[in-house]
Image (cartoon, rainbow, N blue to C red):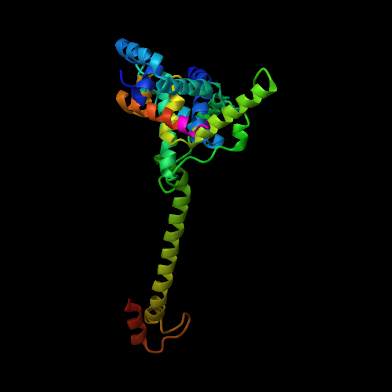
């Protein structure tokens, strides 16, 4: 149990970050994070060292989130609270640059939130979690070719939602 | 070279194409402003997404999980489903109930049986007791002898 606790401590922030952006609900993300590690602990015997532990955790986490989405028959995950977006800090050498950066990040958060969940998840896995194509294919249970095409569509979709 | 499709540009930005394809697209990008802008857009998105602040967890999942797993599992047995050991605990109460029931039936039987005996008994008691009370004089010796011989 001690060794597993260390694994949880190492991966919990990453799994929560992914789930919070995917579900756009901090409460749901917290519940799913706990469930992810509980499920992983109970299914440790099924984990194969050939698969990276983090990849396996992402797979459990996204399956939990999408199962919940299907069960509740929601068309989309709930809207991100404004307070969640307020985590964006001003950063820049001058007040103008800081404001511009903040506005750009807000716009990106909003654009990301407007994407379909399957586009959002693939962007999160690739751009934020830095997973390779093979790992993304394993997490989402799709072929490499599908990863390539879906990622391209997701990127193009996100660009469309960004202000000029 | 004609303009690469979005999928190829996206894959190019990730550097996952074959070396020859990477080179061909790199050459094309030197002359095509449209594709250059598209690629710059992808790169800017990546940089933007990586600078987004991480939502704070603010909760120690590891410790919570340790506590949750150290708790005994809830008893999911159905209430009527008893283990072998449970019967022993209920044995004295069961015996007492059984004995109370048996004694009740026995007493009830006595009452019912006693009622019928009360009707039949007078004829028996007539036969048991002598027609002449003790110390009385037997005026007719035949009657006295007959009554002695009766069951």
Magenta run includes residue A158: no
Say whether residue A139 is left or right of residue A162: left
Quadrant where the N terminus of chain B sits is top left
Say whether residue A51 is left or right of residue A103: left
Say whether residue B58 is left or right of residue B109: right
Q: Position of residue B129 (x, y in %)?
A: 41, 79
What residue is rendered at 40% in x and 23% in y?
A56
What residue is rendered at 34% in x and 25% in y?
B5
Q: Nearer the viewer, residue B136 or A11?
A: A11
Magenta run includes residue A162: yes
Report if residue A128 is visible in the image: no
In the image, residue B116 above or below residue B43? below
Residue range of the region highlighted in magenta in the rendering: A159-164
What residue is rendered at 34% in x and 11% in y?
B23
Looking at this rendering, what residue extends furthest in the right direction?
A95
Quadrant where the C terminus of chain B sits is bottom left
In the image, residue B128 above or below residue A67? below
Q: How many marks?
A: 0
Report if residue B21 is visible in the image: yes
Quarter of the image for residue A51 reads top left
Q: Nearer the viewer, residue B125 or A56?
A: A56
Q: Position of residue B21 (x, y in %)?
A: 31, 14
Q: Position of residue B71 (x, y in %)?
A: 52, 31
What residue is rendered at 43% in x and 55% in y?
B98
Q: Position of residue A93 (x, y in %)?
A: 67, 17
């Amino acid at each position: 149990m001690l060794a597993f606790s260390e694994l949880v401590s190492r991966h919990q922030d990453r799994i929560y970050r992914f789930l919070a952006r995917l579900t756009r609900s901090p409460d749901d993300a917290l519940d799913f994070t706990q469930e992810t590690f509980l499920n992983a602990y109970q299914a440790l015997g099924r984990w194969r060292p050939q698969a990276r532990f983090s990849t396996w955790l992402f797979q459990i986490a996204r399956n939990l989130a999408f199962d919940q989405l299907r069960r509740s028959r929601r068309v989309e995950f709930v809207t991100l609270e404004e307070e969640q977006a307020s985590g964006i800090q001003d950063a820049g050498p001058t007040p103008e640059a800081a404001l511009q950066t903040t506005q750009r990040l807000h716009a990106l958060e909003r654009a990301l939130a407007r994407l379909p969940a399957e586009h959002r998840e693939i962007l999160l896995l690739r751009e934020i979690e830095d997973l390779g194509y093979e790992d993304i294919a394993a997490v989402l249970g799709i072929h490499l070719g599908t990863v390539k095409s879906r990622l391209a569509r997701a990127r193009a979709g996100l660009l469309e939602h960004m202000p000029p | 070279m004609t303009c690469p499709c979005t999928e190829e540009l996206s894959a190019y930005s990730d550097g996952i194409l074959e070396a020859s394809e990477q080179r061909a697209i790199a050459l094309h990008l030197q002359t095509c402003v449209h594709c250059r802008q598209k690629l710059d857009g992808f790169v800017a998105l990546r940089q933007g997404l990586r600078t987004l602040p991480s939502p704070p967890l603010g909760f120690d999942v590891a410790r919570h999980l340790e506590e949750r797993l150290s708790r005994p599992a809830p008893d999911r047995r159905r209430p009527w489903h008893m283990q072998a050991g449970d019967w022993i605990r209920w044995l004295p109460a069961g015996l007492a109930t059984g004995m109370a029931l048996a004694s009740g039936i026995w007493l009830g039987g006595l009452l019912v049986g006693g009622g019928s005996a009360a009707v039949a008994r007078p004829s028996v008691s007539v036969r048991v007791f002598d027609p002449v009370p003790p110390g009385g004089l037997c005026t007719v010796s035949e009657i006295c002898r007959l009554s002695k011989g009766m069951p």
